[in-house]
Amino acid sequence: MGRLIILIMALVIGWPGFSRKIQRAQPPQMPLPDSNLAYEELACGIARPVPRFITFAGQRWMVKDGWYDPGPNRWSDSPQSVWVDASGRLHLKIRKAPDGSGGWLWYSAEVCAVNPTVYGTHRFFINAPGLNENVVLGLFLYKDYRYAELDVELAKWGNAADPTNAQYVAQPWTTPGNLRRFTSPPGDTTHIINWRPGYIRFRSIVGHYPEVPTPTALIDEWLYTGPNNPPESENPRLHLNLWLNGGSPPSDGQEAEVIITDVEVTLLASSANAVPKRQYFTSPVVELRWSSITWAQRYEVQADTRSTFNSPYLYQTQVDAGTLAVTPTLTNGAYYWRVRAQHANGTWGAWTALDTFVVDAP
């Protein structure tokens, strides 16, 4: 028993000369114990009542803010951490600020696309320096780390001696065959996740190119045909983050910055057995309609990007009993909505089951 305890302590606190050979991928995007936000909602940075948004690469992105996993890290939505420059390039920065007692607080950066992505080719054009062993750059599709996450990660996971510094992952990374390590050079590189119904092809290229221009430009590639290829119905979103492994500051004490020049998504043409998407609006004005209740005096309608419907709501209204539809004007994104009826005595009936819709206006 004594030897077992010593071994467990060695694994937890690190025995001198002991190094783990298993490489970690993105830990789960999990809320704090007192948060009731869904995984995808928190991962998209909307833990704040009024999140910050940016426009980059033709998409709208939410900026993460707060103390959350992975890490955990202090995520900042400050323009000092996340900004788009005059050339339209996205900057993600790990930065430090005085903690008021002679030390430093370190802040990480993440953005998440508002709209879910679909099958197709996802290209990330980046400029990254040689990153410190405690710094992680993530370029990934994410809904739930257990079932729907595809990653390109530049990371040494705290091991400065690791000759590799990057990996492709189909989560969960612990499943044998779901992770491939490789070495990516500093400077301009392109990383590609070609997500298809039957496979995922990862590629990395020296320079900024949509495809491999010459054989010598190919850094690495990996064809994944394993069991953890998420279906398109999971509706994952694009994420870009720069963070600290285990929340540990860079060993050299230096801030880190990565520039993402562009993100391109080439959609896969609809397959022969493709089905239309329901509740899909290409106008910002949507119509939400319900059936009549004979005893209803009024109806209350709510719509929000969060299934938990935490106040304040993005849309909330009450209408008289003769009205069976509302037409809110909403920005692009995925929404939940519900409706309930009021009795003559003023009490409210139960909410309907949650329904969803998507606004994708040009």
Image (cartoon, grey):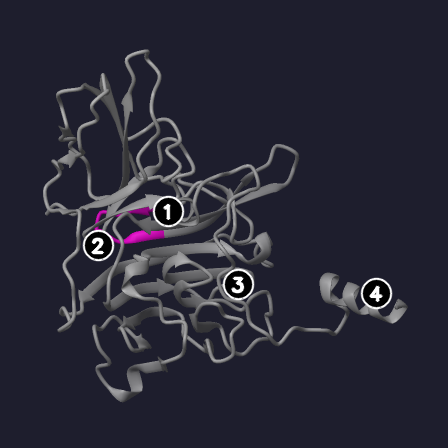
Q: Is tag 1's residue or tag 3's residue first in the polypeptide sequence?
A: 1
Q: Could you classify mark 1 by the number of other residues whose Cα lies within 10 Å: few (under 14), some (14-19), or many (20 or more)?
A: many
Circles 1, 4 touching at the beta carbon (< 8 Å): no
- Judging by the rendered image, the residue that carries numbered circle 4 is 5
- Judging by the rendered image, the residue that carries numbered circle 2 is 57
Report the amino acid beneath label 4.
Ile
Task: Name the spot of residue 2 as percent of width and height, x first.
Answer: 89, 67
Residue toward you, 117 or 23: 117
Report the amino acid beneath label 2.
Ala
Task: Compute the Cα span from label 1 to label 4.
Answer: 40 Å
Circles 1, 3 touching at the beta carbon (< 8 Å): no
Residue at position x 43%, y 71% in the image: 169
Magenta region? 83-91
Q: Is tag 3's residue or tag 4's residue first in the polypeptide sequence?
A: 4
Q: Could you classify mark 2 by the number of other residues whose Cα lies within 10 Å: few (under 14), some (14-19), or many (20 or more)?
A: some
Report the amino acid beneath label 3.
Asn
Task: Compute the Cα span from label 1 to label 2.
Answer: 17 Å
Q: To which quarter of the image does residue 329 belong?
A: top left
Task: Compute the Cα span from label 2 to label 3.
Answer: 27 Å
Q: Is tag 2's residue or tag 3's residue first in the polypeptide sequence?
A: 2
- Judging by the rendered image, the residue that carries numbered circle 1 is 44
Task: Name the spot of residue 352 as percent of width and height, x first.
Answer: 30, 35
Observer-side mark, 1 or 2, equals 1
Identify whether 352 is placed above or below 204: above
Q: To which quarter of the image does residue 32 belong?
A: top right
Identify whether 341 is placed above or below 209: above
- Judging by the rendered image, the residue that carries numbered circle 3 is 132
Task: Compute the Cα span from label 1 to label 3.
Answer: 26 Å
Task: Compute the Cα span from label 3 to label 4.
Answer: 33 Å
Image quadrant occupied by the N terminus:
bottom right
